[in-house]
Amino acid sequence: MKDAKDLGKRIFAEQVNLLFKQYPVSALSGTLASVLFVSVLWRQAPSYLLVSWLAAQNIFLLMGGFISWRYFLASKNSRGSHLWYRLYLANISIVGLIWGFATFFSVFDVSDLLQTFIIIFVAGVAATALVVAIPVQTAYYIYLSLIISPMLIWTFLQPQTTLMWVGGLGV
């Protein structure tokens, strides 16, 4: 029984290790995606809101980088700790929520095409996170629910039938 418990701990520690190993690629792609997102919306939404959103997104991506850096500086014995996993979850939860709130840039007078772009872009960000967060499925499910929930709420509150269909496809 003890061997099975130790094996479970070692497996979890390796899964968390994979999350942190993949974080630099995730942070870089998140930064590039957020810059692309803001550049597409630059003339459609107030620039101060876009810059604030971009700054918040990148601050938390940098915080994740700092957590990752500290993780690799920690001794091998403490890396398997649930503390590192909780720190990772807290960080990606905030990043996911920030991406989810990107949907609210559609409240500005933008075309249906641009609203659809926003929804598809944010859904694409959620889908690509699967590659990074799959070592620990709970991390992915938390990220996914926080990125998709604001988008679905906003979409279903819209009177346009097209957006309701797009929101329904998101479910």
Image: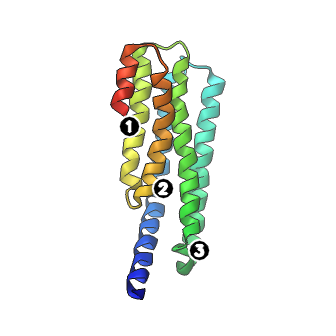
- In the displayed structure, 72 sits above or below 96; it is below
Distance between mark 2 and mark 1 Cα atoms = 19 Å
Q: Circle 3: is it few (<14), some (14-19), or many (20+) Cα within 10 Å?
A: few
The numbered mark, 3 or 2, whose residue comes first in the sequence reads 2
**Residue, x 53% and y 31% (percent of image)?**
102
Q: Is residue 45 left or right of residue 114?
A: right
* Residue 74 tag number: 3
Q: Identify the residue shown where x is 65% and y is 32%.
A: 52
Q: Which amino acid does label 1 sit on?
A: Gly
Do the numbered discs 3 and 1 sit on residues whose CB atoms are within 8 Å? no
Give the number of the mark in front: 3 or 1: 1
Query: Going by the image, does 169 lie left or right of 111?
Result: left
**Res. 124 mark:** 1
Q: Name the spot of residue 91 as percent of width and height, x first.
A: 57, 52
- Looking at the rendered structure, the kind of residue marked 2 is Pro
Q: Classify 10 Å Cα crowding around label 1: few (below 14), some (14-19), many (20 and above).
A: few
**Is the residue marked by circle 2 packed among few (<14), some (14-19), or many (20+) residues within 10 Å?**
some
User: Residue 159 at x, y = what percent?
Assistant: 45, 13
| Helix, strand or loop at mark 3 | loop
15, 28: nearer the viewer? 15
Q: How far apart are marks 3 and 1 (CA)?
A: 34 Å
| Residue 22 sits in quarter | bottom left
Q: Name the residue under label 2.
A: 24
Please state, as top left, top right, bottom left or bottom right, where the N terminus lies in the image. bottom left
Cα–Cα span, label 3 and label 2: 17 Å
Q: In which quarter of the image is the C terminus?
A: top left
State whether residue 48 is above or below residue 72.
above
Q: Position of residue 14 (x, y in %)?
A: 42, 71
Frontmost of labels 2 and 1 is 1
